[in-house]
Image: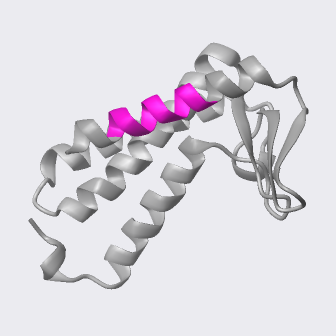
């Protein structure tokens, strides 16, 4: 389940980024739900919410360390499926954004809800995985194991 989840997140992330960059100009926005949601192409040279702009080497280093740690934890903790799934989401998202940073020098973002900074599929996977992981840590429950 872990490799499939990572592959699906990575493939969906890279496919959507490719489609957006092929069909929108930088900063172009297409309304999907008027006033609520648009597809807007931006190049994010920072971290979440654009903080720490132009720190490419730092982001690549932190991503590589995080990815290695997640691989290690997943290798040694496969008994809890939900825990493994949450880490797989984070891993897939981290790999997707790392690919952008290494090959483009920035992360392609395009999901624009107007009340939140523009983000992408990888960011969504990282966020969902982190929330699940946090929930599992705060409220451990044996029924989610195996």
Out of 130 and 53, give the one closest to the viewer: 130
Residue 97 is situated, as x and y percent measured from the top left of the image, at 57, 33
Res 53 seen here: no
Residue under the image location 68 percent in, 17 percent down: 104
Residue under the image location 64 percent in, 33 percent down: 58
Residue under the image location 54 percent in, 23 percent down: 99
Rendered view: 10 above or below 5: above
- Image-based side of 24 in relation to 127, left or right: right
Out of 57 and 82, give the one closest to the viewer: 82
Magenta segment, which residues?
6-16
Out of 109 and 104, give the one closest to the viewer: 109
Q: Is residue 33 magenta?
A: no
Q: Is residue 7 magenta?
A: yes
The quarter of the picture where the C terminus appears is: bottom left
Rendered view: 12 above or below 112: above
Rendered view: 135 above or below 112: below
Q: What's the colour scheme?
A: one colour
Residue 115 is situated, as x and y percent measured from the top left of the image, at 84, 64
The residue most toward the top is 103
- Image-based side of 77 in relation to 110, left or right: left
Assign the magenta stretch its main secondary structure: helix
Residue 62 is situated, as x and y percent measured from the top left of the image, at 53, 38
């Amino acid at each position: 389940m872990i490799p499939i989840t990572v592959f699906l997140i990575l493939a969906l992330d890279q496919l959507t980024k490719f489609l957006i960059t092929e069909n929108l100009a930088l900063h172009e926005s297409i309304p999907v739900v008027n006033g609520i949601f648009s597809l807007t192409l931006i190049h994010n040279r920072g971290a979440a919410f654009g903080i720490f702009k132009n720190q490419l080497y730092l982001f690549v280093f932190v991503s590589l360390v995080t990815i290695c740690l997640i691989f290690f934890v997943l290798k040694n903790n496969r008994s809890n499926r939900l825990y493994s799934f949450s880490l797989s989401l984070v891993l897939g998202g981290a790999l997707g954004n790392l690919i952008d940073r290494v090959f483009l020098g920035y992360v392609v973002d395009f999901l624009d809800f107007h009340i939140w900074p523009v983000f992408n599929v990888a960011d969504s996977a990282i966020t969902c995985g982190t929330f699940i992981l946090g929930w599992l840590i705060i409220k451990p429950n044996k029924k989610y194991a195996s």
